[in-house]
Amino acid sequence: MNRIEQKISEFFEILFTRSVLLEILAIGVCIALGWLAGVQIQRIYASRGRHPSPSLSSAYLIRRGSIVVAPFVIALLLLALSRLALSSMQLDDALLEMAIRLVSAYIIVRVCVLVFAASLGDKSWLQSWETRAAFFIWLAIAAELLDWLDPIINTLDHLGVTAGKNRITLWSIMKLLFTLTIFMVVATWVGRWIERRLMKLHSVALSTRIGISKFVSAVLIALSILLGLNAAGVDLTALTVLTGAIGLGLGFGLQSIAANFVSGFVLLMDRSIKPGDVISFTGQTGTSTDGFGWVQELRGRYVVVRDRDGVEMLVPNQHLISNPVINWSYTDPRVRLKLPVRISYRDDPEVALQVLLQACEGQRRVLRDPLPVSRLMHFGESGIDLELRFWISDPQEGVNNVRSEVNRTIWRLFKEYGITIPVTQREIIMRPAPIDPD
């Protein structure tokens, strides 16, 4: 504490022995003008409407940089002009010089953090922590510029407890957290860089690229944690008890979670289900649409499936591995739909078969190759059972809607040709019970 107290006393000694009030006033005015300029710049960009997504694009960097960096650049220029003015008047400018150094350091840190966060993309957690991360980094640099860093470290290193042969101090905890954060951020950046390079390999299947990128990201995160602990001075052999506890937890309470993660890697590697596939969870073959939807995204624990109602289902990966799933677009997006129709025995089935084929004409989504066909399936109790079969190539656009359109056309054409659809009828004959002569 002696060095910190000494620094504080020196600061107040300088404050009361030098004519620094003018410098403090100049610093306050420069910072206030920079802040007002930043507010005005933010209003200008807000009035323009659309904001570019976080990326390494020039549009995003210019807009974001103008909002978060330009105010400090303006304040820095004003501070430099104020220092020149005080120097020309033969007045002390030590505080202004230090303020210029601190603001310059913040600008450099803010730009570096901005570019680094933009390189991670719009899904990075660093986007929301960008300002706070830059501020904490700048605090450490400012403490070094003011010669306060070593006294602060010594003070934090004396605050702690002794646990066995080791001593846990506040500085060791902060050092551990900082080191782990740095290693994990770098690992995340490398993982994103590898993911972007993999996604450009169009010769490799999409599911394979996703699987490789997620596996690499998981390995990099695990490796960064180990390297961070080692760099912070933590003995990795002391983690054997922790890893044993994790293994025991996986064997009991976390078994389902581990199974979902393993199933996710299996789905990614065998390419049985990939983003864009149209699937349904029915357990039946054919064109049943129960649980119908298309795959939006493959995650480590679940698959995001979006149905026709706009509802996104999070299906556990283990469910897709252990239960039957119909993949409508596994090898070919084309699927065949069947429409059963019953006509009366008084109608000519040949005419009805031609009418069914005529109902497919003019339907935008019905394919001409293969051609639609109509079939006489069997003779039922109440009528003749026919079936119209046709193909579509876009099941992700819906199946029941194209069924509805074709059925409406069939109904209209049956009315024109006088073809009737029989209604099942049952006759009940009641006979009196015979009278016993006795």
Image (cartoon, rainbow, N blue to C red):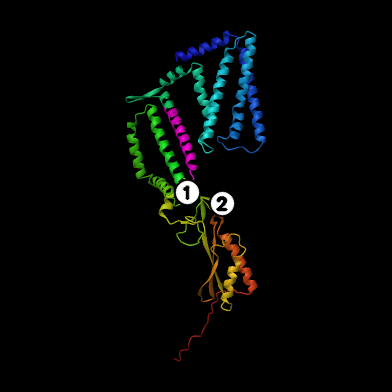
Would you call the spot at circle 2 few (<14 residues within 10 Å), some (14-19), or many (20 or more)? few
Residue 256 x %, y %: 39, 47
* Residue extent of the magenta highlight: 176-204
The quadrant where residue 63 appears:
top right
Q: Residue furthest front?
A: 203
Secondary structure beneath disc 1? strand
Answer yes or no: do the residues labelled 1 and 2 have beta carbons within 8 Å?
Answer: no
Q: Which mark is residue 142?
A: none
Mark 1 → mark 2, Cα distance in angstroms: 15 Å
Would you call the spot at circle 1 few (<14 residues within 10 Å), some (14-19), or many (20 or more)? many
- In the rendered image, which quarter contains the N terminus? top left
Q: Which residue is mark 2?
A: 310
Amino acid type of the residue tagged 1 in the rendering: Val
Residue 273 x %, y %: 46, 51
Amino acid type of the residue tagged 2 in the rendering: Gly
Residue 178 in magenta stretch: yes
**Which one is nearer the viewer's eye here, 21 or 147?**
147
Secondary structure beneath disc 2? loop
State left or right for residue 56 relative to residue 180.
Answer: right
Residue 409 x %, y %: 62, 66
Residue 364 in magenta stretch: no
Q: Which residue is mark 1?
A: 303
